[in-house]
Amino acid sequence: MSPGRPVLASIALALAAVACFAILDTTTKYISASVPVLMALWFRYCFQAVASTVAVLPRGRNLLRTQHPRFHALRGVLLLLTSLFAFFSVKHMPVGEFTAIVMITPLAVTLLAITSLGEKVSPLRWALVAGGFIGTLVIIRPQRDDFNWAMLLPLGLVACNAWFQVLTSKLARTEDPMTMHFYTGWIGTLLASLALPFVWTALPAWQLWAGLLLMGLMGTVGHFLLILAYARAPASTLTPYLYAQIGFAMLGGWVVFSHVPDGWSMAGIALIAICGAAGGWLTARENRRSTSRTTPPTGAQR
């Protein structure tokens, strides 16, 4: 097999994963109009937990053994918080604009590396980080007439997701992808179950049940595809392709909700995509020079 084939396969897996995440977000926005957010969140994680259990158990109990149970627990909590911010965010804002803001996560990871890990960052990277956050402000526009504080929720998602990405990168070096998937699903399910008795609502329409199942399926498949992609290629190679999620999300918002971003929002979306993709290209160039494959994964996971 030629060296390029694994990379092409990983790119295809990453594109399929972000398409799943865009469908998840679009479905979440549709469902959240009729279903309590915490109830929808429980279904999303319960589906992943059951699906990963079915996939893991035939492979033996050894797959469930880990040297880092605390990291798995923390990873599960971070992803649950990320999903919670995501569900509330898409309930109150368009899917395309929400996705664009979430895609500043790689830039947030850069800030995290500076502030928490003590890494040195070039002036160009600082400029890309600044450009990404300017794009976010252009989309949010606090001075706009229809601004509400719920539009700041994606920023909480970005913070949780950035920590989740760094931790995922650390665990992916030693842990089996299915082990990670299994623990993440069950930790999220158990925590969400604590709130379920207080939010459970009878659903009158089968379309709502179908939507909940679709959310669970897309979240589960998307996460597993992304883990497989990172196992085949460096994150720096995949990062530029993850911004295709913005396009998928805008398409979903147009098809389902007839929403098209205004001119300012399109400018902010473009700025975020350009800065993020440029950051991925810069990382790839640096990695080629140092022959390192330790860049943390990026992208919107929930």
Image (cartoon, helix red, strand yellow):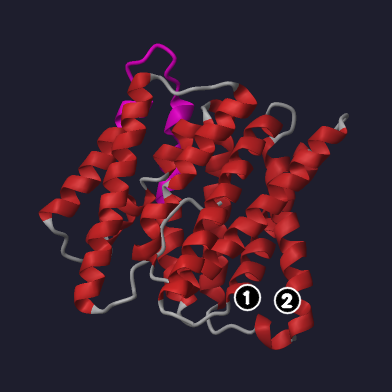
User: From the viewer's perspective, is 295 left or right of 55?
Assistant: left
Q: Is residue 202 visible?
A: no
Residue 11 in picture, x, y percent from top left:
47, 62
Which portion, as a residue range, is magenta?
Answer: 137-159
- N-terminal of the pair, mark 1 or mark 2, is 2
Residue 242 in picture, x, y percent from top left:
44, 52
Disc 2 on helix, strand or loop?
helix
Total numbered circles: 2
- Image quadrant where residue 148 sits: top left
Q: Which mark is residue 179?
A: 1
Q: Amino acid at mark 1?
A: Thr
Tell me if residue 84 is in the magenta stretch. Answer: no
The one of 112 and 237 positioned closer to us in this rendering = 237
Q: Which mark is residue 113?
A: none
- Image quadrant where residue 147 sits: top left
Q: Which mark is residue 56?
A: 2
Residue 198 in picture, x, y percent from top left:
76, 39
Give the main secondary structure, helix, strand or loop, of the magenta stretch: helix
Residue at 57% across, 55% down: 16
Q: Amino acid at mark 2?
A: Val
User: From the viewer's perspective, is 39 left or right of 239?
Assistant: right
Residue at 79% across, 70% down: 54
Q: Residues within 10 Å of mark 2 (few under 14, many from 20)?
A: some
Q: Is residue 22 above or below residue 30?
A: below
Residue 241 in picture, x, y percent from top left:
41, 53
User: From the viewer's perspective, is 58 left or right of 253?
Assistant: right
Residue at 46% across, 40% down: 246
